[in-house]
Amino acid sequence: MKPPSLRSIMVGLIPFAGMCFSVPLWDRVDPTILGVPFNLAWLICWIVLTSVCLGIAARIEQSRGQASSDGARDETAPQSADRGE
């Protein structure tokens, strides 16, 4: 198994940064969104966005895996043609 690409790691770290390092931006209760305090609404939004970001990271890794397996198939194709099959 190959290690994950830097691009997928960066996409996966976006929710972590959004929830942990943005506290000074949303550390208030006064505005409410649908009756929920803003800080709780902010965290709920990031929980949903975490799924989106991890889905994007998974697609990056899937496409990376398919590209490497397609390359392996192309390398074996001339060998079978040389055998006369």
Image (cartoon, rainbow, N blue to C red):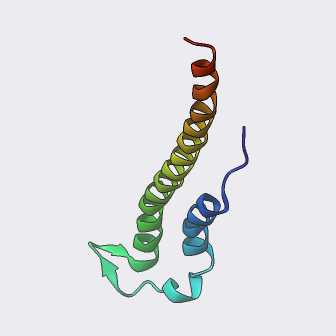
Q: Decide if residue 36 is on the left or right side of residue 21.
A: left
Position above or below: 67 against 74: below
* Residue placed furthest toward the top: 85
Height in image: 23 above or below 12?
Answer: below
Image check: 3 left or right of 75?
A: right
Q: Which of 82 and 47 is in front in this view?
A: 82
| Rendered position, 45 above or below 33 | above
Residue at image x 44%, y 73%?
42
Q: Position of residue 65 (x, y in %)?
A: 58, 42
Residue 71 lies in quadrant = top right
Give the residue displayed 52% in from the left and 53% down from the top: 60
The answer to which of 24 and 82 lies nearer the viewer is: 82
Q: Position of residue 30 (x, y in %)?
A: 39, 87
- Residue 6 % position (x, y): 67, 62
- Location of the C terminus (image quadrant): top right
Judging depth in this view, the residue of 59 and 43 nearest the camera is 59
Horizontally, residue 52 falls left or right of residue 70, namely left
Residue located farthest toward the left when viewing the structure as drawn = 34
Q: Is residue 51 left or right of residue 20?
A: left
Residue beneath the point at 61% across and 63% down: 7
Q: Which residue is drawn at 43% across and 64% down?
A: 44
